[in-house]
Amino acid sequence: MVFWVKFLAMKRSSISKDVIVNNEYNREIDWELRPGGMLVQKRDAGDGSSRAMIKIKVSYGSYHHDLTVPAQSTFGDLKRVLAQETGLEPKEQRLLFRGKEKDDEECLHMVGVKDMSKVILFEDPASKERKLEEMNRNQGILKAYEDVAKVRMEVDKLSEKVAALGATIRGGAKVAEKEFLVLTELLMVQLLKLDSIEADGEAKVQRRIEVRRVQSFADTIDSLKARNSNPFSSGSNAVSVTTKWETFESGVGSLSAPAGLQSSTKITQDWELFD
Protein backbone atom coordinates (compact mmCIF):
# COMPACT_ATOMS: atom_id res chain seq x y z
CA MET A 1 0.00 0.00 0.00
CA VAL A 2 2.78 2.42 0.93
CA PHE A 3 4.60 1.56 -2.29
CA TRP A 4 1.51 2.34 -4.37
CA VAL A 5 1.11 5.72 -2.70
CA LYS A 6 4.70 6.60 -3.45
CA PHE A 7 4.28 5.54 -7.06
CA LEU A 8 1.22 7.75 -7.50
CA ALA A 9 3.04 10.67 -5.90
CA MET A 10 5.97 10.26 -8.28
CA LYS A 11 3.62 9.97 -11.27
CA ARG A 12 1.76 13.12 -10.26
CA SER A 13 5.01 15.00 -9.92
CA SER A 14 6.14 13.87 -13.38
CA ILE A 15 2.84 14.87 -14.98
CA SER A 16 2.96 18.24 -13.24
CA LYS A 17 6.50 18.82 -14.56
CA ASP A 18 5.48 17.86 -18.11
CA VAL A 19 2.62 20.32 -17.99
CA ILE A 20 4.95 23.10 -16.86
CA VAL A 21 7.40 22.30 -19.61
CA ASN A 22 4.66 22.14 -22.20
CA ASN A 23 3.24 25.43 -21.01
CA GLU A 24 6.65 27.06 -21.22
CA TYR A 25 7.17 25.94 -24.86
CA ASN A 26 3.55 26.22 -25.90
CA ARG A 27 4.14 27.22 -29.53
CA GLU A 28 4.08 25.78 -33.04
CA ILE A 29 7.05 23.51 -33.74
CA ASP A 30 9.08 24.08 -36.92
CA TRP A 31 10.86 21.16 -38.55
CA GLU A 32 13.94 20.99 -40.76
CA LEU A 33 15.56 18.30 -42.85
CA ARG A 34 19.13 17.45 -41.85
CA PRO A 35 21.78 16.46 -44.46
CA GLY A 36 21.40 12.80 -43.47
CA GLY A 37 17.67 12.89 -44.28
CA MET A 38 16.52 13.04 -40.63
CA LEU A 39 13.59 15.35 -39.85
CA VAL A 40 14.32 17.25 -36.64
CA GLN A 41 12.95 20.23 -34.76
CA LYS A 42 14.34 23.46 -36.22
CA ARG A 43 16.66 25.31 -33.88
CA ASP A 44 15.61 28.87 -33.10
CA ALA A 45 17.45 31.94 -31.94
CA GLY A 46 17.06 30.86 -28.31
CA ASP A 47 19.02 27.70 -28.95
CA GLY A 48 22.68 28.09 -28.11
CA SER A 49 23.67 26.01 -31.11
CA SER A 50 22.32 28.70 -33.52
CA ARG A 51 24.88 31.14 -32.17
CA ALA A 52 27.75 28.74 -32.81
CA MET A 53 30.43 30.14 -35.13
CA ILE A 54 32.32 28.09 -37.68
CA LYS A 55 35.49 28.87 -39.58
CA ILE A 56 35.34 28.43 -43.34
CA LYS A 57 38.23 28.41 -45.78
CA VAL A 58 37.34 30.14 -49.04
CA SER A 59 39.59 29.66 -52.06
CA TYR A 60 39.49 32.42 -54.71
CA GLY A 61 42.01 31.84 -57.47
CA SER A 62 45.45 32.05 -55.86
CA TYR A 63 44.01 33.76 -52.76
CA HIS A 64 42.67 32.13 -49.61
CA HIS A 65 40.32 33.73 -47.08
CA ASP A 66 39.51 32.40 -43.62
CA LEU A 67 36.05 33.55 -42.58
CA THR A 68 34.19 33.04 -39.32
CA VAL A 69 30.41 33.05 -39.73
CA PRO A 70 27.38 31.75 -37.83
CA ALA A 71 26.83 28.05 -38.42
CA GLN A 72 23.30 28.59 -39.76
CA SER A 73 24.23 31.30 -42.27
CA THR A 74 23.13 31.02 -45.87
CA PHE A 75 25.42 31.13 -48.89
CA GLY A 76 23.93 34.55 -49.62
CA ASP A 77 25.17 35.70 -46.20
CA LEU A 78 28.57 34.27 -47.02
CA LYS A 79 28.67 36.20 -50.30
CA ARG A 80 27.99 39.46 -48.49
CA VAL A 81 30.91 38.80 -46.19
CA LEU A 82 33.13 37.88 -49.14
CA ALA A 83 32.17 41.11 -50.92
CA GLN A 84 34.02 43.04 -48.22
CA GLU A 85 37.05 40.79 -48.52
CA THR A 86 37.34 40.49 -52.30
CA GLY A 87 35.58 43.54 -53.72
CA LEU A 88 33.26 41.32 -55.76
CA GLU A 89 29.58 42.17 -55.51
CA PRO A 90 27.39 39.26 -54.30
CA LYS A 91 25.72 39.05 -57.73
CA GLU A 92 29.18 38.62 -59.30
CA GLN A 93 30.08 35.66 -57.07
CA ARG A 94 29.66 31.95 -57.60
CA LEU A 95 30.20 29.57 -54.64
CA LEU A 96 30.99 25.88 -54.97
CA PHE A 97 30.89 23.32 -52.18
CA ARG A 98 31.80 19.69 -52.85
CA GLY A 99 31.87 20.41 -56.58
CA LYS A 100 28.36 21.88 -56.81
CA GLU A 101 27.31 25.51 -57.13
CA LYS A 102 25.09 26.64 -54.27
CA ASP A 103 22.14 29.03 -54.33
CA ASP A 104 21.95 32.05 -52.07
CA GLU A 105 18.99 30.63 -50.11
CA GLU A 106 20.75 27.38 -49.13
CA CYS A 107 21.96 27.15 -45.54
CA LEU A 108 25.53 26.16 -44.81
CA HIS A 109 24.68 23.56 -42.17
CA MET A 110 21.98 22.03 -44.34
CA VAL A 111 24.45 21.00 -47.04
CA GLY A 112 27.10 19.81 -44.62
CA VAL A 113 29.35 22.87 -44.23
CA LYS A 114 31.15 22.49 -40.92
CA ASP A 115 34.03 24.07 -39.09
CA MET A 116 37.14 24.25 -41.35
CA SER A 117 35.14 23.27 -44.45
CA LYS A 118 36.43 24.54 -47.79
CA VAL A 119 34.35 26.59 -50.24
CA ILE A 120 35.50 27.67 -53.68
CA LEU A 121 34.70 31.15 -55.00
CA PHE A 122 34.93 32.21 -58.62
CA GLU A 123 33.73 35.26 -60.50
CA ASP A 124 30.68 35.05 -62.72
CA PRO A 125 31.94 34.72 -66.35
CA ALA A 126 29.43 37.24 -67.71
CA SER A 127 30.47 39.79 -65.10
CA LYS A 128 34.12 39.14 -65.81
CA GLU A 129 33.54 39.71 -69.53
CA ARG A 130 31.73 42.99 -68.86
CA LYS A 131 34.59 44.20 -66.70
CA LEU A 132 37.09 43.25 -69.38
CA GLU A 133 35.14 45.19 -72.01
CA GLU A 134 34.92 48.21 -69.73
CA MET A 135 38.64 48.04 -68.99
CA ASN A 136 39.47 47.89 -72.71
CA ARG A 137 37.15 50.81 -73.37
CA ASN A 138 38.79 52.87 -70.62
CA GLN A 139 42.22 52.03 -71.97
CA GLY A 140 41.09 53.12 -75.43
CA ILE A 141 39.85 56.44 -74.08
CA LEU A 142 43.10 56.98 -72.19
CA LYS A 143 45.15 56.21 -75.29
CA ALA A 144 43.05 58.63 -77.35
CA TYR A 145 43.70 61.35 -74.76
CA GLU A 146 47.42 60.68 -74.95
CA ASP A 147 47.48 60.70 -78.76
CA VAL A 148 45.55 63.97 -78.94
CA ALA A 149 47.89 65.50 -76.36
CA LYS A 150 50.92 64.56 -78.47
CA VAL A 151 49.40 66.19 -81.55
CA ARG A 152 48.54 69.28 -79.49
CA MET A 153 52.20 69.68 -78.53
CA GLU A 154 53.27 69.51 -82.19
CA VAL A 155 50.58 71.99 -83.23
CA ASP A 156 51.73 74.37 -80.49
CA LYS A 157 55.23 74.32 -81.98
CA LEU A 158 53.89 74.95 -85.47
CA SER A 159 51.72 77.79 -84.20
CA GLU A 160 54.88 79.57 -83.05
CA LYS A 161 56.31 79.25 -86.56
CA VAL A 162 53.11 80.63 -88.07
CA ALA A 163 53.27 83.61 -85.70
CA ALA A 164 56.94 84.24 -86.58
CA LEU A 165 56.13 84.06 -90.29
CA GLY A 166 53.36 86.60 -89.89
CA ALA A 167 55.63 88.97 -87.99
CA THR A 168 58.21 88.77 -90.76
CA ILE A 169 55.71 89.58 -93.51
CA ARG A 170 54.13 92.44 -91.56
CA GLY A 171 57.61 93.85 -91.11
CA GLY A 172 57.85 94.25 -94.89
CA ALA A 173 60.27 91.41 -95.58
CA LYS A 174 59.80 89.05 -98.46
CA VAL A 175 59.45 85.33 -97.63
CA ALA A 176 60.24 82.49 -99.99
CA GLU A 177 57.28 80.46 -101.22
CA LYS A 178 58.93 77.32 -99.88
CA GLU A 179 58.39 78.52 -96.31
CA PHE A 180 54.63 78.53 -96.77
CA LEU A 181 54.64 75.12 -98.48
CA VAL A 182 56.70 73.38 -95.79
CA LEU A 183 54.66 74.83 -92.92
CA THR A 184 51.37 73.85 -94.58
CA GLU A 185 52.58 70.28 -95.14
CA LEU A 186 53.59 69.96 -91.49
CA LEU A 187 50.12 71.06 -90.43
CA MET A 188 48.53 68.54 -92.79
CA VAL A 189 50.61 65.76 -91.22
CA GLN A 190 49.14 66.60 -87.82
CA LEU A 191 45.68 66.69 -89.34
CA LEU A 192 46.15 63.15 -90.65
CA LYS A 193 47.29 62.01 -87.22
CA LEU A 194 44.13 63.42 -85.67
CA ASP A 195 42.01 61.71 -88.29
CA SER A 196 43.53 58.33 -87.41
CA ILE A 197 42.73 58.63 -83.69
CA GLU A 198 39.67 56.61 -82.61
CA ALA A 199 38.07 58.55 -79.79
CA ASP A 200 34.78 58.64 -77.88
CA GLY A 201 33.25 61.03 -75.40
CA GLU A 202 35.48 63.82 -74.14
CA ALA A 203 38.48 62.53 -76.08
CA LYS A 204 36.48 62.99 -79.29
CA VAL A 205 35.71 66.58 -78.29
CA GLN A 206 39.41 67.30 -77.70
CA ARG A 207 40.27 65.81 -81.10
CA ARG A 208 37.72 68.06 -82.81
CA ILE A 209 39.20 71.13 -81.11
CA GLU A 210 42.66 70.29 -82.43
CA VAL A 211 41.31 69.73 -85.94
CA ARG A 212 39.82 73.21 -85.89
CA ARG A 213 43.10 74.66 -84.64
CA VAL A 214 45.06 73.07 -87.48
CA GLN A 215 42.55 74.31 -90.05
CA SER A 216 42.71 77.80 -88.57
CA PHE A 217 46.51 77.91 -88.85
CA ALA A 218 46.31 76.62 -92.43
CA ASP A 219 43.93 79.49 -93.30
CA THR A 220 46.31 81.96 -91.66
CA ILE A 221 49.18 80.67 -93.79
CA ASP A 222 47.09 81.13 -96.95
CA SER A 223 46.38 84.74 -95.99
CA LEU A 224 50.06 85.41 -95.28
CA LYS A 225 51.02 83.82 -98.56
CA ALA A 226 48.65 86.11 -100.47
CA ARG A 227 49.97 89.14 -98.66
CA ASN A 228 53.52 88.07 -99.35
CA SER A 229 52.79 87.80 -103.08
CA ASN A 230 50.95 91.14 -103.29
CA PRO A 231 52.00 93.50 -100.51
CA PHE A 232 49.74 96.27 -101.87
CA SER A 233 46.68 94.16 -101.10
CA SER A 234 47.35 94.45 -97.41
CA GLY A 235 46.10 98.05 -97.29
CA SER A 236 49.43 99.46 -96.16
CA ASN A 237 50.32 103.03 -97.18
CA ALA A 238 53.97 102.20 -97.49
CA VAL A 239 54.94 102.18 -101.17
CA SER A 240 58.31 101.03 -102.39
CA VAL A 241 59.46 102.94 -105.54
CA THR A 242 62.57 102.04 -107.43
CA THR A 243 63.89 104.67 -109.88
CA LYS A 244 66.71 104.28 -112.39
CA TRP A 245 68.56 107.48 -113.00
CA GLU A 246 70.59 108.25 -116.23
CA THR A 247 73.87 110.19 -116.13
CA PHE A 248 74.29 112.99 -118.67
CA GLU A 249 77.69 113.98 -120.04
CA SER A 250 76.98 117.71 -120.34
CA GLY A 251 75.72 117.98 -116.87
CA VAL A 252 72.44 119.42 -118.16
CA GLY A 253 70.95 116.55 -119.97
CA SER A 254 70.70 115.04 -123.39
CA LEU A 255 68.12 115.96 -125.97
CA SER A 256 68.33 112.62 -127.61
CA ALA A 257 65.92 109.97 -126.50
CA PRO A 258 67.24 107.01 -124.62
CA ALA A 259 68.31 104.10 -126.71
CA GLY A 260 65.34 102.05 -125.68
CA LEU A 261 62.91 104.70 -126.82
CA GLN A 262 64.48 105.48 -130.24
CA SER A 263 62.28 104.59 -133.21
CA SER A 264 63.52 102.01 -135.64
CA THR A 265 61.73 103.81 -138.51
CA LYS A 266 64.00 105.69 -140.96
CA ILE A 267 62.42 108.87 -142.33
CA THR A 268 63.54 110.36 -145.64
CA GLN A 269 62.32 113.72 -146.91
CA ASP A 270 62.34 115.12 -150.50
CA TRP A 271 62.42 118.90 -150.77
CA GLU A 272 60.63 120.76 -153.53
CA LEU A 273 62.26 123.83 -155.20
CA PHE A 274 60.10 126.87 -155.93
CA ASP A 275 60.88 129.54 -158.49
Image (cartoon, helix red, strand yellow):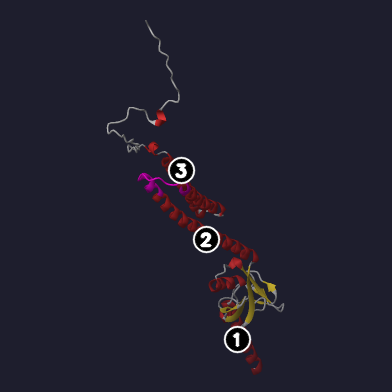
- Of mark 1 and mark 3, the one earlier in the sequence is 1
The three-letter amino acid code for the residue at tag 2 is: Leu
| Residue beneath the point at 59% across and 83% down | 17
Where, by quadrant of the figure, is residue 29 drawn?
Answer: bottom right
What is the chief secondary structure element of the magenta stretch?
A: helix
Q: Alpha carbon of mark 1 to alpha carbon of mark 2: how far?
A: 84 Å
Residue, x 32% and y 30% (percent of image)?
254
Residue at the left extreme? 252
Q: Identify which residue is drawn at 58% across, 81% down.
A: 55
Instruction: Point out the residue furthest to the top here.
Output: 275
Can residue 114 be seen in this snapshot? no
Q: Position of residue 95 (x, y in %)?
A: 64, 72
Q: Is residue 193 visible?
A: yes
Secondary structure, mark 3, is helix
Please name which of the two marks, 2 or 3, marks the residue nearer to the observer: 3
Name the element at disc 2.
Answer: helix
Q: Nearer the viewer, residue 28 or 165?
A: 165
- Disc 1 versus disc 3: distance between alpha carbons? 117 Å
- Location of the N terminus by quadrant is bottom right
Q: What residue is at 42 percent from the left and 50 percent from the top? A: 162
Write down the residue under mark 3: 222
Q: Which mark is residue 21?
A: none
Residue holding disc 2: 142
Q: Earlier in the sequence, mark 1 or mark 2?
A: 1
Q: CA distance from mark 2 to mark 3?
A: 35 Å
Please state which amino acid type lies under the numbered disc 1.
Ser
User: Is the residue marked by circle 2 packed among few (<14), some (14-19), or many (20+) residues within 10 Å?
Assistant: few
**Residue under label 1:** 13
